[in-house]
């Protein structure tokens, strides 16, 4: 029955029949419609349309129709015929092999079981997949969706997504037209993301990506602008698909226009800086080739927050509300005159400084590091540095340190800053086992980098550990069959809370057991023990500048031998040695760029370690120990033994023991590193180091401890007498020590280490990548160094030389790893043949 | 495993049981006996089955309160808030609203870290006080608000005072001034005035000659402010020891003028 909208008539619903339901209950559908038996409605009328729309919106049906089946007087009987949308059961992909890619698509398109397959959903899915692949260069991609009825479920379908990727389309030619001043090659170089395919470019992409291409076109125009062609523009650009070659040919038509020059640059509105000062920062002279990009950069460089531009000149001296605008005032032929209009505004001061988001770290630990202080003149630089330094604390995610400027008040000249922080875990647990040194080595390390000692005895602070005062506490246990090491260290960066004076202390104890050659096991009764304690203070100096760090420490070490004998010290099987020393170190470090790959700058350090001159007052005549009965060999009855000539035999162990019971020495070290940026990111690192270990009393002699061991990778190794390993590539580890002939036995050895050494090196470095996830750089080096037994032998020109190359990889999770191949040009001490190639593995950072 | 009412076995059985009634009754028993941990586990299991039914009101309240009793204040606050929203006509509404606010109060951390929960708790308690001005919990609510305000005062004061500790006296003066303005009626006012004077004193004593007179005058004014606020007390006694230095030097500068 045809009925028009205009002459709708009122009926009472006598009943509604639902037809076409497959998976739903008839009653459910009726409830959805909201129509009730007995309801008065107009047919045709808005009510029915409304119901239909409502049902459509559910996105469950592909067809919805109402029929008037019967009319009995005022009563109408309706029939609702619906067709349910099929539900998706299973999806299979064809043409994409990687499960990961499939999962991505499923996730992004929501192609999951139970999805209602509307027409628009199917179209969107197809388009999505097509676009996804087109974007990465598969311009020939064809996606088809096939559905088949799933017989195991009601009203469900299985789907096959067939993705025919086709051949990848690469870029064939990039042609420029209309360019006279800049060559095709130069312009192509500007297109950083859109590159021509050619032989040899197989490891990099040469795909056509629309967005990147648009960006590249802007770069081309910018290049012209840098050269003074400020009117340059791209008239047309065409991208044509070359079917035969399956490539895209790009043709770009440019209009270069004329070259322009800077004319007069005048300033308006500047009262705190003179024109000359501003000109110096701007760095653009009259007659320079017009360069809009440079001009913009010198006024406000958006890419660098700490750039040396005009905006920062003002922003770093309180002018928060300043604004600077260059305006072209006139042009004479090819010369453009500029007026830089400056509104300085009132100088602003920092007012309220607040911190939010510190759920663990106590306020005082944070506020003392923030450089923006209440009442201080506004400086953008202080904000930038505060953000960086808060990130460097290690307690917060550096990416999420956000300075929020609040309540800027141009009238009072005040600004509030709220630093938003996000805490991150800063404690580490190290538990590892490994093989080395002839057996299993187990390590347990705990380090808490944001500890709070004052809460140690507060029960409620254990969530799970007392935290928030920025202190470091670490414990480390390492044990194997042959040795055990326990160490504990603690540091507080602001001792007393008044100044950044860092306090640190550490305790350690190492027990080394003798290796029994016969049983090939450790002999637990024969051991030597090194125990030590160190207390240190370090302070950043304010004078002459804040790149200086002065640190001092007091250390005590004791060496005890129990039935243990080593060739190194001739102090008997049960000897002891004590080392109480004071160390002072002054370091100046001013490096640019990150610490992993400094671009330029330098680092110097001078370090002195010394003990008290005990021999000044202890009354021991070290020169003539052998003449004293106490230091002579005796038989079982206590009679002095003599040689054939009747001269008493000296007890060399006892003499040695007397010399080292309290070690007496001084040690001076100097080290300098210079980083010079040659071109681009090619950096030359030159270093020089020199160190000397001496004795106050020559009769007592230079101690066999604390010496230097030159050669090899220079990595710290376990050394009995506190020997310092100094690297010199191209030679085996510790191979360059001077050879000493024992005056008694006449044996030659180089076990003792040197008392003086110098080393020079030149290293050329070039980074392959400097991303936060991994920094990689390659290097080549020239090195030379030598170690001597005393000052008399010292000759700065008698050096062992080497050259080589290597690579370093830094990843935050693993630290620094590297490998170097070095060629030693000179023979090892006591040999005649040049040493030749050596391979060194570098683990860990050496600062 | 020990319980007065029922054996441990029964609890385990109820946990695994499919019978809602068994769980419900046992949960109620545990709840009445004060074993909120077990009651909580059982309520958690049956709550979805009662959603939308008349018993839900009772159960959800018990459920929320069991969290409160086992000191899981975070969840307790959430569950009480939910109760308040879904049962606006309940007899327990006022109690639930109070406990929701009190749970948040319990979440407020020590003063020296971020105070988001403290601020939320003050807002919630204030909302409760406004909504039920004659409730019996009002004195307690007021007391909690006072404690939280005091905590915020303490935080702001310690931050401002730290500038004095790290010897940045100019910042200390600005920060303490801001503190005094932003926290009217704070119990730390006397101390804040003292530290402001102390900062001004040290700043005046170590300044350039040409700034000396201004700084000395500022210190004198800071002293006067403290004296006017609290003429007797330990802080003014400490300040009295320092003010003579200021006055002596001021005399010199007046004369040389």
Image (cartoon, coloured by chain):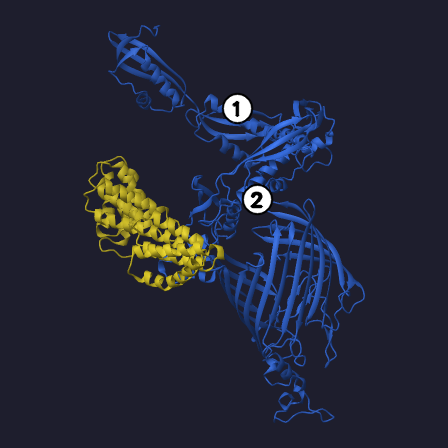
Chain colours: A blue, B yellow
Secondary structure under tag 1 reads: strand
| Foreground of the two, B163 or A614 | B163
Q: Residue at x 58, y 38 (%)?
A: A301
Looking at the rendering, in which quadrant would you find the N terminus of chain B?
bottom left
What label does residue A301 carry, if any? Answer: none
State the residue position of label 2. A306
Residue B190 is left or right of residue A581, and the answer is: left
Q: Report the residue marked by disc 1.
A: A146
Residue at mark 2: chain = A
In the image, A81 versus A286, the foreground residue is: A286
Q: Chain of mark 1?
A: A
Tell me if mark 2 has few (under 14), some (14-19) or many (20+) residues whose alpha carbon lies within 10 angstroms of its own: some
Q: Quadrant of the C terminus of chain B?
A: bottom left
Nearer the observer, A327 or A134: A327
In this rendering, does residue A457 appear at all? no
Q: Is residue A155 above or below residue A422?
A: above
Residue at x 64%, y 86% (from the top left corner): A621
Q: Establish if A110 lies above or below A445.
A: above
């Amino acid at each position: 029955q045809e009925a028009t909208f205009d002459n709708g008539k009122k009926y009472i619903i006598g009943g509604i029949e639902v037809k076409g339901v497959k998976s739903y209950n008839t009653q459910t559908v009726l409830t959805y419609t909201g129509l009730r038996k007995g309801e008065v409605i107009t047919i045709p009328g808005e009510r029915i349309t409304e119901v239909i729309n409502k049902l459509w919106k559910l996105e469950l049906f592909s067809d919805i129709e109402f029929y008037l089946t019967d009319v009995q007087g005022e009563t109408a009987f309706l029939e609702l015929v619906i067709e349910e949308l099929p539900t998706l059961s299973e999806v299979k992909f064809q043409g994409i092999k990687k499960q990961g890619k499939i999962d991505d698509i499923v996730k992004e398109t929501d192609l999951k079981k139970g999805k209602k397959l509307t027409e628009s959903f199917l179209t969107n899915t197809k388009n999505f997949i097509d676009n996804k692949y087109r974007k990465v260069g598969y311009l020939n991609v064809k996606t088809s969706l096939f559905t088949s009825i799933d017989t195991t479920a009601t009203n469900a379908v299985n789907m096959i997504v067939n993705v025919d990727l086709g051949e990848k389309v690469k870029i064939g030619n990039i042609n420029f037209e209309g360019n006279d001043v800049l060559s095709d090659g130069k312009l192509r170089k500007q297109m950083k993301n859109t590159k021509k395919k050619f032989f040899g470019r197989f490891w990099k992409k040469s795909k056509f990506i629309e967005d990147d291409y648009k960006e590249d076109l802007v770069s081309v125009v910018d290049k012209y602008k840098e050269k003074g062609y400020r009117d340059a523009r791209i008239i047309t650009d065409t991208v044509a698909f070359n079917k035969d070659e399956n490539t895209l040919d790009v043709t770009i038509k440019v209009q270069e226009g004329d070259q322009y020059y800077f004319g007069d640059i005048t300033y308006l509105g500047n009262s705190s800086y003179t024109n000359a000062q501003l000109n110096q920062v701007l760095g653009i002279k009259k007659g320079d080739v017009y360069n809009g990009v440079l001009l913009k950069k010198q006024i406000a460089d958006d890419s660098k927050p700490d750039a040396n531009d005009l905006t920062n000149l003002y922003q770093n001296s309180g002018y928060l509300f300043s604004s600077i605008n260059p305006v072209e005032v006139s042009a004479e032929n090819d010369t453009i005159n500029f007026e830089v209009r400056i509104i300085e505004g009132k100088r602003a001061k920092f007012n309220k400084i607040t911190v939010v988001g510190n759920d663990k770290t106590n306020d005082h630990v944070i506020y003392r590091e923030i450089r923006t202080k209440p009442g201080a003149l506004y400086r953008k630089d202080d904000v930038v540095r505060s953000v960086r330094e808060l990130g460097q604390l290690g307690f917060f995610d550096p990416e999420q340190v956000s300075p929020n400027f609040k309540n800027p008040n141009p009238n009072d000249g005040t600004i509030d800053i709220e630093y938003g922080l996000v805490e991150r875990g800063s404690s580490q647990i190290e538990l590892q086992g490994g093989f080395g040194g002839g057996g299993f080595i187990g390590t347990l390390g705990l380090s808490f980098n944001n500890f709070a000692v004052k809460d140690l005895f507060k029960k409620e602070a254990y969530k799970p550990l007392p935290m928030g005062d920025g202190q470091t506490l670490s414990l480390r246990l390492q044990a194997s069959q042959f040795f055990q090491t326990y160490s504990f260290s603690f540091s507080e960066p602001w001792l007393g809370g008044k100044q950044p004076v860092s306090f640190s202390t550490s305790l350690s104890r190492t027990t080394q057991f003798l290796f029994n050659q016969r049983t090939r096991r450790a002999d637990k009764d024969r051991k030597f023990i090194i125990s030590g304690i160190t207390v240190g203070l370090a302070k950043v100096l304010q004078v002459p500048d804040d790149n200086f760090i002065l640190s001092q420490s007091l250390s005590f070490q004791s060496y005890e031998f129990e039935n243990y004998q080593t060739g190194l010290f001739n102090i008997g099987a049960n000897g002891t040695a004590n080392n109480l020393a004071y160390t002072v170190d002054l370091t100046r470090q001013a490096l640019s760029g990150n610490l992993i790959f400094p671009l330029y700058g330098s680092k110097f350090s001078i370090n002195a370690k010394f003990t008290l001159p005990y021999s000044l007052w202890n009354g021991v005549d070290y020169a003539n120990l052998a003449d004293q009965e106490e230091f002579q060999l005796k038989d079982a009855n206590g009679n002095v033994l003599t040689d054939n000539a009747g001269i008493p035999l000296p007890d060399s162990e006892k003499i040695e023991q007397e010399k080292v019971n309290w070690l007496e020495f001084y040690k001076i070290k100097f080290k300098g590193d210079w980083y010079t940026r040659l071109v681009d990111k090619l950096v030359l690192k030159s270093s020089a180091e020199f160190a000397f270990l001496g004795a106050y009393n020559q009769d007592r002699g230079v101690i066999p401890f604390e010496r230097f061991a030159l050669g090899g990778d220079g990595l710290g190794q376990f050394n009995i007498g506190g020997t310092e390993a100094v690297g010199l590539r191209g030679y085996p580890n510790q191979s360059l020590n001077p050879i000493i002939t024992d005056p008694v036995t006449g044996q030659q050895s180089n076990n003792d280490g040197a008392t003086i050494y110098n080393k020079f090196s030149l290293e050329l470095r070039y980074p392959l990548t400097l991303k936060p996830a991994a920094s990689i750089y390659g290097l080549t080096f020239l090195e030379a160094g030598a170690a001597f037994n005393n000052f008399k032998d010292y000759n700065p020109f008698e050096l062992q030389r080497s050259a080589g190359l290597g690579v370093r990889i830094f990843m935050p999770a693993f630290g620094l790893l590297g490998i170097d191949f070095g060629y030693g040009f000179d023979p090892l001490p006591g040999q005649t043949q040049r040493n030749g190639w050596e391979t060194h593995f570098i683990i860990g950072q050496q600062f | 495993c020990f319980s007065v009412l029922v054996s441990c076995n029964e609890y385990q059985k109820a946990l695994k049981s499919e019978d809602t009634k068994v769980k419900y009754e046992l949960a109620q028993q545990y709840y009445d006996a004060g074993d909120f941990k077990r009651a909580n586990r059982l309520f958690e299991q049956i709550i979805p089955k009662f959603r939308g039914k008349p018993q839900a009101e009772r159960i959800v309240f018990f459920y929320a309160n069991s969290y409160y009793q086992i000191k899981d204040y975070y969840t307790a606050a959430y569950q009480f808030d939910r109760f308040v929203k879904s049962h606006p006509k309940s007899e327990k509404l006022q109690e639930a609203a109070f406990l929701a606010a009190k749970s948040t109060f319990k979440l407020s951390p020590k003063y020296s870290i971020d105070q988001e929960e403290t601020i939320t708790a003050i807002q919630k308690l204030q909302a409760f006080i406004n909504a039920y001005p004659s409730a019996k919990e009002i004195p307690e609510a007021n007391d909690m608000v006072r404690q939280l305000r005091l905590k915020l005062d303490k935080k702001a004061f310690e931050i401002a005072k730290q500038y004095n500790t790290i010897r940045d006296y100019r910042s200390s003066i600005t920060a303490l001034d801001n503190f005094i303005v932003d926290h009217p009626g704070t119990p730390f006012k006397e101390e804040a005035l003292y530290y402001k004077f102390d900062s001004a004193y040290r700043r005046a004593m170590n300044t350039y000659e040409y700034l000396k007179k201004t700084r000395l005058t500022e210190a004198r004014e800071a002293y006067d402010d403290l004296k006017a606020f609290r003429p007797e007390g330990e802080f003014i006694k400490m300040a009295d020891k320092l003010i003579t230095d200021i006055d002596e030097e001021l005399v010199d500068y007046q004369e040389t003028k």
